[in-house]
Amino acid sequence: MKVMEEIKLMKGNEAIAHAAIRCGCDGYFGYPITPQSEVMETLMQEKPWETTGMVVLQAESEVAAINMVYGGAGCGKKVLTSSSSPGVSLKQEGISYIACAELPCLIVNVMRGGPGLGTIQPSQADYFQAVKGGGHGDYKLIVLAPSSVQEMADFTVLALDLAFKYNTPSMLLADGIVGQMMEKVVLPPFVPRRTEEEIRQQCPWATTGKVNRKSNVITSLALQAEEMEETNLRLQRKYAQIVENEVRFEEVQCDDADYILVAFGSCARVGEKVVELARNEGIKLGLLRPITLWPFPTKEIQRLAKQVKGFMSLELSAGQMVEDVRLAVNGTVPVEFYGRQGGVVPLAEETLAALKEKLVK
C-alpha cells in the first residue's frame, strides 16, 4: 500500500525544527534572535524530549550555545544550533574550535541586515562570514543555501549527513525571507536516534568520559608548530575531497544563454522572474543558483564562461558572492553586480534594468 505524503504549511524556521526532530537529532542549543527564533520556539512546542529524547536547551548566550554544541559533537551526538547574523558572530571562536577538532554539527544562520545590530529584515551579507570562515585560522564550513521552505527541511538533513560524512561542521545559510515565509512542505520521515552502541561504532573518535578507561581526547590545541601544521594539512586534504565530491547547483535556461544571473536563497527566486522577463524581451538570460556556497560551483561557472557574454551576481548585500564569481571567470568575460542592502529586496524589474544597463550590449 502506498503511503500518502503528509503535506504541511509552515515557516522555513519551523521546517528546520521539525526536520531536526525527524532526522534523529540528539540535541539543540540556541539563543533567541530575530528572524530565526521560531526554530527554538517550535522545538519547545513540540517537546521532543518526551517523544524522541532530544535535548532542547536555551543557553544563557550564543557563546554558551556553541560550546554546548562543541561538547555534544565531541560525544558523537547529532547536535545543532541556530542564530542570526550578530549571534553567529559571537559563535565564531567556537565554530573555529569545532572545525579544528574535526567534529560534525550543524549551525543555522538566518541572516538579518547589518552591520552592527542592524535590522530584523532579510540580508545575505553574511556570505563572507560563512564561506570565507568568519573565525580565526584556515578552516572551511560546508555551506548550504536553501531558497524554499522545502529546502529548509531537506537541507537540515543533508547538512547533518555531510557533517558526519566528513567530520566537519556544516552551515545552513538562509536569509530572513526564507526563514519567515510560509510554504507547503513534505517533512522527512522519522529516523530513530542512534543508540550509544551505534554512536560508538559510527564515531570511534568520540570521547567517552569513562573513568579508569582510556578515553579519546577532543581538542583543537597543538603545542608544537609542526603538529599544528600537520593538522592544517589534514584539514586541507579533507577540504579538497569535499570540493571534488559535494558541489551542488541548479541551472535555469543556461543551455542557450548569452548572459548568466548568479543568485542564491531568496534572490534566486527573484532571479527566476528576471529570466522570464528578459526572455520576453528577447534577451537570452539564464540563472545559476549555487546550492553549496562552499564548495562553490567554480568549475560550472568556468564552463559557462566559455559560451556566454557575461555574468551578473544578484545579492542582498553590497556584493560578496560576486568576488567568487569573478575569481571563477578570471577575466574571460565581464562580471557585474546588482544588489540591495539593509533589508531591501530587489524587484525583478529593477534587476533586469540593471542587467541591461551594465551588461547587455
Image (cartoon, helix red, strand yellow):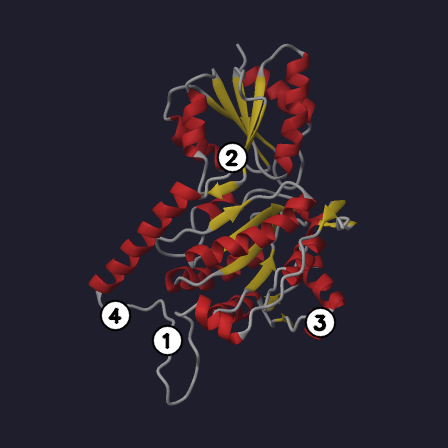
Q: Whole-Å distance between the Cαs marked 2 and 4?
A: 39 Å
266 or 85, which lies in front? Answer: 266
Quadrant housing residue 280: top right
Q: Nearer the viewer, mark 1 or mark 3?
A: 3
Q: Whole-Å distance between the Cαs marked 2 and 1?
A: 44 Å
Q: Say whether marks 4 and 1 touch (CB < 8 Å).
A: no
User: Residue sitting at 37 percent across and 80 percent down?
Assistant: 215
- The vertical placement of 141 against 20, above or below, is above
Q: Whole-Å distance between the Cαs marked 4 and 1?
A: 18 Å
Sequence-wise, which precedes: disc 2 or disc 4? 4
Tell me residue 161's x, y (percent).
Answer: 52, 55
* Type of the residue with mark 2: Gly
8 or 108, which lies in front? Answer: 8
Tell me residue 90's x, y (percent).
Answer: 52, 61
- Residue at numbered disc 3: 51
> Tag 2's secondary structure?
loop
Q: Count of labels shown? A: 4
> Tag 1's secondary structure?
loop
Q: Whole-Å distance between the Cαs marked 2 and 3?
A: 45 Å
- Residue at numbered disc 1: 216
Determine if residue 116 is in view.
Answer: no
